[in-house]
Image (tube, grey):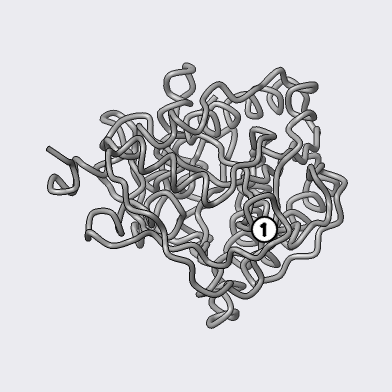
Amino acid sequence: MTWLITGGAGYIGAHVVRAMTEAGERAVVYDDLSTGIAERVPDGVPLVVGSTLDGELLGRVLTDHRVTGVVHLAAKKQVGESVDRPLHYYRENVEGLRVLLDAVTTARVPSFVFSSSAAVYGMPDVDLVTEETPCVPMSPYGETKLAGEWLVRATGRATGLATASLRYFNVAGAASPELADVGVFNLVPMVFEKLTEGAAPRIFGDDYPTPDGTCIRDYIHVVDLAEAHVAVAHALRASPGRDLTLNIGRGEGVSVRDMIDRVNAVTGHHRPPTVTPRRPGDPARVVASADRITTELGWKARYDVQDMIASAWEGWVRRHPGAALG
C-alpha cells in the first residue's frame, strides 16, 4: 500500500514514516513545514509541501501517488494557544480535516487513520481511562480532536471508508537523535530546557489528590506509538469498512515529581524542582487503559519511561552540546 502521511515531517509523523517504511509500506509525506522539518523525511520518500486546506493539491497528490491509505497527523496542538486562538484551531484542525476527507472519498482511498488525543477526555474521574470513558474536552484543542473523531466516523459510515481514531497519551522519546522532539511544550523537553539553563525544573501545583501531590500522566514512547500506527494500518487493510477508536498508552501512571527525579538521574543533573501554582484545567490523573488495542490488534508498548528519557536526552544533547555534564 501507499500511505499519505500528513504532518510526516513533524516529530511524531517522522517516526510514523520510518515505521511504515520499515514495515515495507510505501510512504508519501504531506506537510506545510510550519513546524515540520524537511530533513526528517527519509531519502526516497516524496515530500509534498502543502496545507490540508488545499483540496485541489490534496486531490492531485492522492491520485498521482496512487494513495491507498492516509494517516492524518497534521494539526495545531498547543492547548494554551487554542484557548487564545480558537477560530484558528477549528479552521486548521476541523476544516482542514473536512477538506482532506473530501479529497480522500473523491479519490476512493479505502483507509484513514486519524491522530486524536487523550485531550478528548478532559478531566476523567477514573483510575484508568477506557475508550468508553465520557469525553468532556476542556480546551478548543481537545474539542477539535473530538469533533475530528465524529467527522471521521460519520464519513466512514456514509462511504465505507475504513477508519481509526487513535487517542495518544503523553508522547516522549526518540528513535534516533535526529528525530527527537525539538519543541519545548511537553514535560520532558521542558525539564531538559531548565536543566540546560542551570535553572530548577517547575512543577505546576503539588496539592493534587495524588500520592505526592503532583499530576499523574501516562507516557508512551514515540517508537511504540509509531508501531501502533503500523498495526492499525494493517488492520484497516485487512477489514474494509472497519471503525476503530483506540487509546495508545502504557497503562502506567508516573507523577510529575517522579518524572523530574528520573530525568535528573538519567541526565546526571541533580536540581530539585520548584513548585509554582497550578495551571488551569490540569487534571490530577490521566492514565490509559490500553487493553483494547492489545486484545484486538496484539499491539503492546515495549519501552519504559527510562528508555523515553534516555533517547530524548541523546537528541537534546546533540542540539545543545553544553547540556551534557562532564
In screen coordinates, is 106 left or right of 324?
right
Nearer to the camera, 134 or 307: 307
In screen coordinates, is 287 left or right of 132?
left
Answer above or below: position of 322 versus 178: below
In the picture, the quarter occupied by the N terminus is top right
**Residue 302 image offset from top left, x and y in percent:** 55, 21
Answer above or below: position of 276 versus 174: below
Circle 1 Cα neighbour tier, 10 Å, few/some/many (<14 / 14–19 / ≥20)? many
- Which amino acid, by three-letter code, is at mark 1? Ala
Nearer to the camera, 314 or 96: 314
Residue depicted at x 53% and y 73%: 80
**Residue 108 image offset from top left, x and y in percent:** 67, 40
In the picture, the quarter occupied by the C terminus is top left
Answer above or below: position of 273 versus 141: above
Residue depicted at x 42% and y 64%: 274
Residue 130 in view here: yes
How many numbered tags mark residues here? 1
Answer above or below: position of 178 versus 18: below
SS at circle 1 = helix
Which of the 4 quarters of the picture holds residue 26? top left
In screen coordinates, is 119 left or right of 23?
right
Residue 66 in view here: no
**Residue 148 image offset from top left, x and y in percent:** 70, 58
According to the picture, the residue beneath numbered tag 1 turns out to be: 119
**Residue 317 image offset from top left, x and y in percent:** 21, 42
Residue depicted at x 80% and y 45%: 127
Nearer to the camera, 77 or 282: 282
Nearer to the camera, 70 or 128: 128
